[in-house]
Image (cartoon, grey):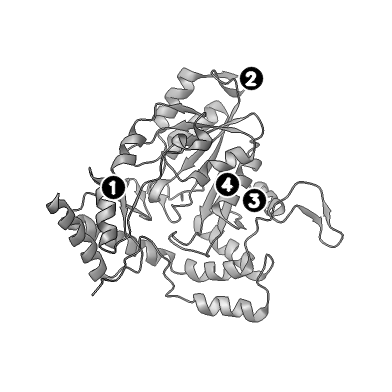
Amino acid sequence: MKEKFIPLSIPNFNGKELEYVTNVVKDAWVSTGGAEIQKFEEVFAKYVKTDLACAVQSGTAGLHLAMILAGVTYGDEVIVPALTFIAAVNPVKYCGAEPVFMDCNDFLCLDVNKLEEFIKEECDFIDDKLINKKSHRHIKAVVAVHIFGNMVDMDSLITLGKQYNFKIIEDATEALGTYEKSTGKFAGTIGDFGVYSFNGNKIITTGGGGMLVANNPDDVKHAKYLSTQAKDDLVYFVHNEIGYNYRMTNLQAALGLAQFEQLEEFIKIKEINYNKYLDAGLNLLPFDKNIRSNRWFYSLVTDKRDELIKYMNENQIQTRPIWKLINTLKPYLNAQSYKIERAKKYYDHIVNIPCSTNLTDKEIERVIKTIKNFDEAK
């Protein structure tokens, strides 16, 4: 008898999702207006301790709006990590700017020490602008992606941002609920802008969707305006800026509210399951001890990445490699990169293993046993 398939990361709908979504459907208010959107924004903002939040259609939409609000435009440059999902980088190009790729640290997040080295060796600071010596472009912002629930060294990055006058856009799409232990500040709330994702594989989901926050409430208000096609007059269709169809739907927000009620429980489950894997002797990358991580994804370190992925698939267990480095992808082959070293190593040796919050003990045991059987066979 064929064993049941164990997916990598799927939603957990054990709360009031059906009730809340059904109520919205009954009210027939399912699109980009409705009370649930505002309610979701308010609940979210209170949780992460910001004044306002703007619900959008995706994390990518949120990042694009953050770029616009940060003033990124044609001819500018933005520092981005090489090791991330491509959605963290594409919005740079949407704005007509160019990415410069940076290496990662041992928590897979952007290496701020190497960024500082790049600034000192490869840039000039002229008239309050950070200028890339090679391209002569203005470096307007840095995208700090908090990978798999870890956090970029935000204290050091904030110091650099103030010193060299660039904006910091936190991509917290994988780090909802992660915070610094010393300050209690949540990932996404420390830089100028923070963006979250509620894609189907995230710790909570709205099917698709995202959220944008900022340290200036006026930026969030502007984001809401831009995300609804920049409507200045709702009756006579006056639009004074280029806007976007980026607003979250009421249906998504209803789902998000039910999911949000379970967030802290999901984080507890993530930690428990991660420790079960560790206690079984699996070689997982650690999470930074200075943060409370949501432990979104678990990273197994192996010298036989592709063979392990194939073996797990044959045994009905979904795993995946880490993303192919963005600077090696066709759209970005001509972009500037700076000393990409650790990212190459981790790309070759990381396999993400099942981490859903509805994994059973039996399924976890099967994942462990299958990995150990592979190791013994090899």
Q: Secondary structure at mark 1?
A: helix
Q: Which residue is mark 3?
A: 220
Q: CA distance from mark 3 to mark 1?
A: 43 Å
152 and 324: which one is in front? 324
Mark closest to the chain's N terminus, 2 or 4: 4
Mark 3 or mark 1, whichever is nearer to me = 1
| Crowd tier of the residue under label 4, counting other residues whose Cα lies within 10 Å: few below 14, some 14–19, many 20 or above | many
Give the residue at x 64% y 38%. Answer: 95
State the residue at coordinates (67%, 32%). 74
Q: Secondary structure at mark 2?
A: loop
Circle nearer the N terminus (3, 1)? 3
Q: Please state the horizontal and vertical placement of residue 329, each as a whole percent of the image.
A: 47, 38
Q: Position of residue 258 (x, y in %)?
A: 50, 71
Residue under numbered circle 2: 127
Q: Quadrant of the N terminus?
A: bottom left
Res 213 seen here: no
Reading the image, the residue beneath label 1 is 306
**Sequence-wise first label, 1 or 2:** 2
> Residue 63's mark?
4
Secondary structure category for the residue under label 4: helix
| In this picture, residue 320 sits left or right of residue 124 | left
Report the amino acid beneath label 3. Answer: Val
Give the mark toward the camera: 1 or 4: 1
- CA distance for labels 1 and 4: 32 Å
**Residue type for callout 4:** Leu
Q: Amino acid at mark 1?
A: Asp
- Given this view, does label 2 or label 4 mark the residue nearer the observer? 4
